[in-house]
Amino acid sequence: MTQDELFKVLVAHCKEYGFIFPSSEIYDGLAAVYDYGQMGVQLKNNIKNYWWEAMTRLNENIVGIDSAIFMHPRIWEASGHVGAFNDPLIDNKDSKKRYRADVLIEDYLGKIEEKIEKEVAKGRKKFGEAFDEAQFRATNPNVLREQAKWDEVHNRYVAAEKANDFAEYRQIIIDCNIVCPISGTCNWTEVRQFNLMFSTSMGSTADGANLIYLRPETAQGIFVNYLNVQKTGRMKIPFGIAQIGKAFRNEIVARQFIFRMREFEQMEMQFFIKPGTELEWFKKWKETRMKWHVNLGMGAENYRFHDHEKLAHYANAATDIEFNFPFGFKELEGIHSRTNFDLGNHQKFSGKKIEYFDPEENTSYTPYVIETSIGVDRMVLAVLSHAYTVEELEGGDSRVVLKIPAPLAPIKVAVMPLVKKDGLPEVAQKVVDELKYDFSYQYDEKDSIGKRYRRQDAIGTPFCVTIDHDTLNDGMVTVRERDTMQQERVKIEDLRALIEKKVSLTNLLRNL
Ligand code: GAP
């Protein structure tokens, strides 16, 4: 299966098993908006809990808040979003489809990277043990040709990005012969700037005075509450404020399932520090956040940092944690050193003094900020795309299994009486009563055991517990583990501890 096909199959699987549905589907859907189903919401909540507890429980100097989505419109002038939160758009004149010019170029660069990696993989296969990757990259003519192409386009792109030179974006697209995937032509319009904020009106009239925005990031709700939290929590710098909440962006290129949505959720943390210490804290938060990801066991090789060459209007250092999605390495989380840009501007725009009095140094200053910002939905996609596995079984059969990290799995245990008679359902019900206070579970007594296992594999349930006739005599049940499919007989009273060991969020947090 190609990565493209795998992605399509994953989207269908998410719908079929109650993870993610297109929004408003019976009205033919709403572009780039999705609903979470009965499985998806549990996976999402588990991800949010892992983040929330790692931030607010494991760091005694980080507290959480929940600010409103509606905020005073001046906030978005102070933050720079009204003036500068734009995407460079380009239209194909034949298909009339609209694209982000920067994404077209980045995808083109990504394809060259893929070609290089394929060549390297071929070399590795051909030379086996004796393969010297550095030498291969430095001498193989195909790699050198592709690398030279990549360097040239990348240099032009970075220069255009820095200079906000949109005519050059278009020229790169034309020179590289990047075509519209729908029309297949290179007949492009000029590149234009498009503001991403959604607006609505508040109150009974719809005149300009009541225009407000749906927040495009949760961070500003933290900045405008800096004084409230610092004072009421008696927080001392360095300290952080964490928040999980919805954000809204009128994204134009929106064809990557839940990777780029118009309504999505962010988990953001602003860490307030003394000016001059930002690079040290930036490094610390890069390490901390990478550890959080790798701790899930989805393979350290599937993450990488991508340092920004062009910095956002508020940042003096920035990096992305990229994940190896089915469509290549893409941004999962952003870590930004935001200086005192936001607090400084809110001070200017609101006229309120926003400072910190440092008792040790007997001075006041406007704190600097390191921000970590991750999209919940992107994290859901990372987990699902990594988890989706098709396995060939003995006897020519195959199974689809979601190998979701066990503490994040929507359902932790399935309880199944072998047959619907002979008192087995009653014992199964007792097992449910034993487990339900600690674990999300499903009770299933329909179809053959094999079919029931497949259903649980498809939603990523780490354990299936079967009650059979022997259980009536020996009080033992069969526990089947999702990934290995291995089965063992376990006493009913030992079940809780066995499941807990593998699915516990506490254990996951302890490993951080
Ligand atoms: N406060 C900083 C900020 O919002 P960002 O890089 O624009 O920075 C942070 O967004 C994270 O939010 C991204 O790394 C991504 O995971 C997520 N995100 C951004 N736009 C998104 C969208 N349209 N759909 C889903 N997730 C998105």
Image (cartoon, rainbow, N blue to C red):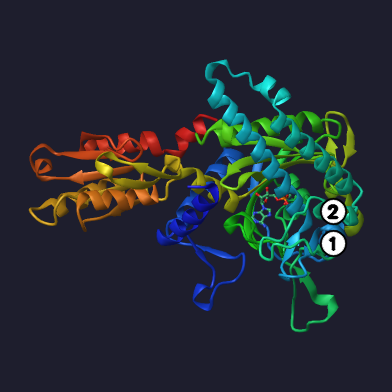
Identify the residue position indicated by label 2 in the image: 169
Q: Position of residue 107 (x, y in %)?
A: 70, 49
Marks 1,2: beta carbons within 8 A: yes
**The one of 211 and 154 positioned closer to us in this rendering:** 154
Q: Amino acid at mark 1?
A: Val
The residue that appears at 57% across and 38% down in the rendered structure is 54
Q: Amino acid at mark 2?
A: Tyr
The residue that appears at 84% across and 56% down in the rendered structure is 170
Q: Is residue 489 left or right of residue 397?
A: left
Secondary structure at numbered mark 1? loop
The 10 Å Cα crowd at callout 1, few under 14, some 14 to 19, many 20 or more, is many
* Cα gap from disc 1 to disc 2, whole angstroms: 7 Å
Is 70 above or below relative to 304? below
Residue furthest out toward the front: 141
Q: Position of residue 309 (x, y in %)?
A: 82, 40
The residue that appears at 82% across and 55% down in the rendered structure is 174
Could one spot residue 365 in this view of the protein?
yes
Identify the residue position indicated by label 1 in the image: 191
Q: Position of residue 463 (x, y in %)?
A: 31, 42
Q: Quadrant of the C terminus?
A: top right
Total of numbered circles in the picture?
A: 2
The 10 Å Cα crowd at callout 2, few under 14, some 14 to 19, many 20 or more, is many
Quadrant of the image occupied by residue 166: bottom right
Does the beta carbon of the residue at mark 1 sit less than 8 Å from ligand 1? no
Does the beta carbon of the residue at mark 2 sit less than 8 Å from ligand 1? no
Residue 47's tag is none
Q: Earlier in the sequence, mark 1 or mark 2?
A: 2
Q: Position of residue 268 (x, y in %)?
A: 67, 48
Could one spot residue 351 in this view of the protein?
no
**The one of 173 and 319 positioned closer to us in this rendering:** 173
Quadrant of the image occupied by residue 28: bottom right
